[in-house]
Amino acid sequence: MANFPEIVHEPTQQGFAKQALAQGLIDSHGRAITDLRVSVTDRCNYKCVYCRTGQVGAQYDELTTEQYLRLIRNFVDLGIEKVRLTGGEPLLRRDLTEMVRELASWRTPLGQKLDIAITTNGHLLEDLAQPLKDAGLSRVTVSMDAVEQETFERVTRVPGSFPAVVQGIRAAQQAGLGPVKVNCVLLRGFNDDQIEGFGHLARREGLIVRFIEFMPLEEGRLWNLDMVVPVKEIVDRLSTVFPLKPLAPNAASETARRYGFTDGIGEIGIIAPVTQAFCGACSRIRLTSDGKIRTCLFSHREHDIYAQLRLGATDQDLRTFILSAVEKKEARHHIGEPGFLKPSRSMVHIGG
Ligand code: SAM
């Protein structure tokens, strides 16, 4: 991030802000913040057992597309290079394709195109994959917690969801959004019997399958450390499908440990925020559907940038606000430590 060009607007008076305008978005722990996750809705058409109680719908308002774009533009002017649209379920948002088209037309201050990704449950992807690709979407990650229909639908609690997601993944591949990443949250006793099946799926379909440790971010109270399946067990069990070898990370801030099967067919990633936290390399910041900046999934404090918009903030005011929020980014999370408290919002309402 050296030599990040100063943006044309007047710099702010704060020392930290001045430095950030000159260097990109750097937090007070020296981490470059390049990755913005935007929740475009907290509505979801699934009721995954580890995420939702099954009773609660949307809890928060949604910004208009114009408001999202204005806020995201200011993040990008400060150094954001990747924008991931998530939720809730982002494909429920009717104007998503238009939002992607607009984001894809932008350039960063360094003249680069934005890397635009979506995380989706894939239920509506069959019809939307091609329009999203045409609009400029770079990549898609589909959440899929089982390779067998019965287990899958026991998790989502939506009959018919399995074939819909399989069709969605195929449509994404056909639209040229590959290699598609498939994210699976593993829970002991729910779906840990699917590990080997996912190994076969990665090899057969040319997918990048990533296992994610269950984090204490559910609406109810389900999480405990015994439910987390350790990395070693996942690797050992996948090695029975075909021998695995570690692969080099694609980037320093990559959250997944990468493995490839030794014949080069299929890729596995393991994301272990609980047992092997990667906070030291965190490059992320989040914007919730109701316009709050969250600097960590586990933040107890939110930064209400929507309130600034409503008060008539200029773009420079918004950037100063973003810089000040980034400065307060937490050094790390404290999952599993004595006194750990879950954040007041759960994953579906933050934007995963
Ligand atoms: N609806 C979209 C989807 O299903 O991908 C986007 C939002 S969803 C909240 C994003 C990701 O967070 C999904 O992969 C989901 O499995 C994951 N997730 C939800 N709750 C989680 C938890 N407590 N721990 C780890 N991952 C979780």
Image: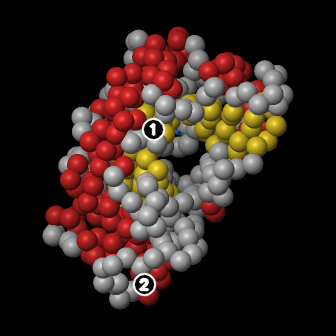
- Image: 151 above or below 181: above
- Image: 167 above or below 133: above
- Image: 128 above or below 216: above
As rendered, which of 98 and 276 lies closer to the eye? Answer: 98
Q: x and y percent of residue 167 in the render?
A: 45, 17
Q: x and y percent of residue 14 in the render?
A: 39, 86
Give the quarter of the image for residue 242: top right
At a point 45% along the width and 76% down the height, the residue shown is 5
Q: x and y percent of residue 180 in the render?
A: 54, 32
Q: Is residue 85 left or right of residue 3?
A: left
- The residue identified by callout 1 is 119
At a point 63% along the width and 63% down the height, the residue shown is 280
Q: x and y percent of residue 81 in the render?
A: 47, 59
At a point 64% along the width and 55% down the height, the residue shown is 251
- The residue identified by callout 2 is 18
Describe the element under mark 2 as helix, strand or loop: helix
At a point 41% along the width and 11% down the height, the residue shown is 160
- Image: 172 above or below 79: above
As rendered, which of 238 and 2 lies closer to the eye? Answer: 2
Q: How far apart, in angstroms, are the residues tagged by discs 2 and 1?
A: 33 Å
Quarter the C terminus occupies: top left
Give the quarter of the image for residue 136: top left
Quarter the N terminus occupies: bottom right
